[in-house]
Image (spheres, grey):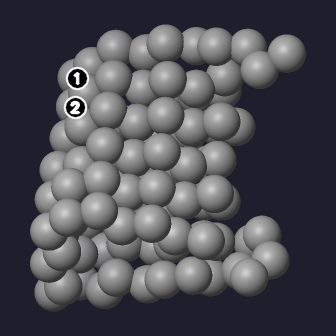
Amino acid sequence: MTQGTMAAIIEDGCKLEGNITLNGVGRIAGIVNGTIFSNDTVIISEAAVINADIIADVIMISGIVKGDIKATSRVEIIKPARFEGTITTPSLIVEDGVIFHGTTKMHDDK
């Protein structure tokens, strides 16, 4: 798959336990407990409940996430998201109205 290709869609009503590895963009609207890895973008939809560490290039959150996340490019947290954990990324965008309980570690890729 080329970068930017949709690799997986986990719809509302699905529940996954364990490790998810994506080669491309993944959109998650269900429940995930474990770890999520993508070489591209992970999109956490409003209906999602994630208890997992996430590693990806870009991470976009509008659901509930508890865990540590690492993004090589950026993290965007969009209302009505709830986040609890640690974020490591060079770029962080948090929309007004988001509930954020955690810490951030900004790093420079240069």
Q: Amino acid at mark 2?
A: Glu
Residue 108: where, in percent of width, then height? Answer: 73, 14
| Count of numbered tags | 2
Judge whether 51 appears above or below 108 on screen.
below
Q: Amino acid at mark 1?
A: His
**Quick one: 49 or 68, which is closer to the camera?**
68
Q: Residue at 46% across / 73% down in the picture? A: 27
CB under 8 Å between discs 1 and 2: yes
The circle drawn on residue 84 is: 2
In the picture, which quadrant includes the C terminus?
top right
Residue neighbourhood size for the residue with mark 2, other residues' Cα within 10 Å, grouped as few (<14), some (14–19), many (≥20)? some
**Location of mark 1 (residue):** 101
**Quick one: 8 or 44, which is closer to the camera?**
8
The reply to whether residue 49 is in sight is no
The reply to whether residue 68 is in sight is yes
Judge whether 79 appears above or below 8 on screen.
above
Q: Is residue 37 left or right of residue 19?
A: right
Q: Residue at 80% across / 77% down in the picture? A: 2
Q: Residue at 31% across / 74% down in the picture? A: 29
